């Protein structure tokens, strides 16, 4: 409902107030790719009846709505941001995604379940917010794309890490926070996943680099995990 009805309502409102509209989409619209996901590349099919389909399919529907509104309203400036695993200090311990889940379990001494071979790219929320700020303030190279009022772009840090590597970083940072050795309590279970969960997800950044030619990532994964672990520890 949020992704479909909510998007429709916001697009309708944006046409009334002549707003710049930014759609928070997701890397999951690409389906299960075995290569970097490019904006213009052919997508794999998303299974419409798998356990996560309500998320991926409704995000796809939201992008379609953005396309329709951009075609129908030439004065509406629409951006679709396909976001790749943004994380940050203010995530809650009930979030359910891999970084807060690993941090919560490690600080509590609980066991983590690792899909060791799966890899992801992670972008710190502060870097993501800088991208949004550049769009809002017009600090980008619009000449890099064709003359259109719709830009679809990947937003993420293309540096890839396996989930095993992520766990090791989180474990090291948790030890620093509690100031004593922390037992590594984890199980590698390659089958602990939902159907059609991509094994590999990395953004193709060719268009992003043209639109934001001077953008530099300020927070690498280890630094971001350090900040996030500290935040979790302080709150608990």
Image (cartoon, rainbow, N blue to C red):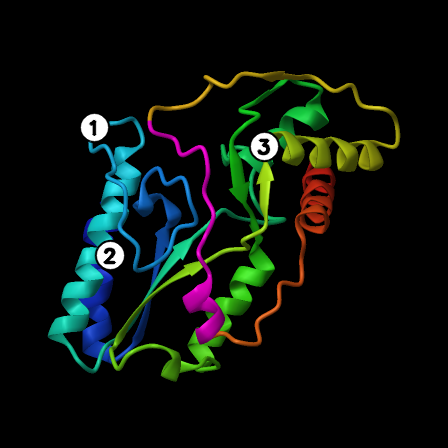
From the viewer's perspective, is the residue at label 1 or at label 3 nearer?
3
Q: Relative to residue 200, is residue 168 drawn left or right?
A: right
* Residue situated furthest right in the rendering: 180
Where in the figure is residue 219, as x and y percent of width and height? 67, 57
Q: What quarter of the picture does the N terminus occupy?
A: top left
Question: Residue tagged by mark 3?
Answer: 163
Q: Earlier in the sequence, mark 2 or mark 1?
A: 1
Q: Relative to residue 150, is residue 12 drawn left or right?
A: left
Question: Residue tagged by mark 2?
Answer: 63
Q: Earlier in the sequence, mark 1 or mark 3?
A: 1
* Residue 206 belongs to magenta span: yes
Q: Relative to residue 201, is residue 123 drawn left or right?
A: right
Q: Secondary structure at mark 2?
A: helix
Residue 28 visible to an observer of this rendering? yes
Q: Residue at x 29, y 41 (%)?
A: 56
Vertical order, 172 against 75 (above or below): above
Vertical order, 179 against 160 (above or below): above
Q: Quarter-wise, where is residue 53 in the image? A: top left
Where in the figure is residue 189, as x and y percent of width and height? 53, 16
- Classified by dominant secondary structure, the portion drawn in magenta counts as loop
Question: Residue tagged by mark 1?
Answer: 49
Q: Are marks 2 and 1 in contact (CB under 8 Å)?
A: no
- Segment colored magenta: 196-211
Alpha carbon distance from label 1 to label 3: 26 Å
Vertical order, 51 against 131 (above or below): above
* Residue 47 belongs to magenta span: no
Q: What quarter of the picture does the C terminus occupy?
A: top right
Where in the figure is residue 35, as x and y percent of width and height? 42, 45
Alpha carbon distance from label 2 to label 1: 19 Å
């Amino acid at each position: 409902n949020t992704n479909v009805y909510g998007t429709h309502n916001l697009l309708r409102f944006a046409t009334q107030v002549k707003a710049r509209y930014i759609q928070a989409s997701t890397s999951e619209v690409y389906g299960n790719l075995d290569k970097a996901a490019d904006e213009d590349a052919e997508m794999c099919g998303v299974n419409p009846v798998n356990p996560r389909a309500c998320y991926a399919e409704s995000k796809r529907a939201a992008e379609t709505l953005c396309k329709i509104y951009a075609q129908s309203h030439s004065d509406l400036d629409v951006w679709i941001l396909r976001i790749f695993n943004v994380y940050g200090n203010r995530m809650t311990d009930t979030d359910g995604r891999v970084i807060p889940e690993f941090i919560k379990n490690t600080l509590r001494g609980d066991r983590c379940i690792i899909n060791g071979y799966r890899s992801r790219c992670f972008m710190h929320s502060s870097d993501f917010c800088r991208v949004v700020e550049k769009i809002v303030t017009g600090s980008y190279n619009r000449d890099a794309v064709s003359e259109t009022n719709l830009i679809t772009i990947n937003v993420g840090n293309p540096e890839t890490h396996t989930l095993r590597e992520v766990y090791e970083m989180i474990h090291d940072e948790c030890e620093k926070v509690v100031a004593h050795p922390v037992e590594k309590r984890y199980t590698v279970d390659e089958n602990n996943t939902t159907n059609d969960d991509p094994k590999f997800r990395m953004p193709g950044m060719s268009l992003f680099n043209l639109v934001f030619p001077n953008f530099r990532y300020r927070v690498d994964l280890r630094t971001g995990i350090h900040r996030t672990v500290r935040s979790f520890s302080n709150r608990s």
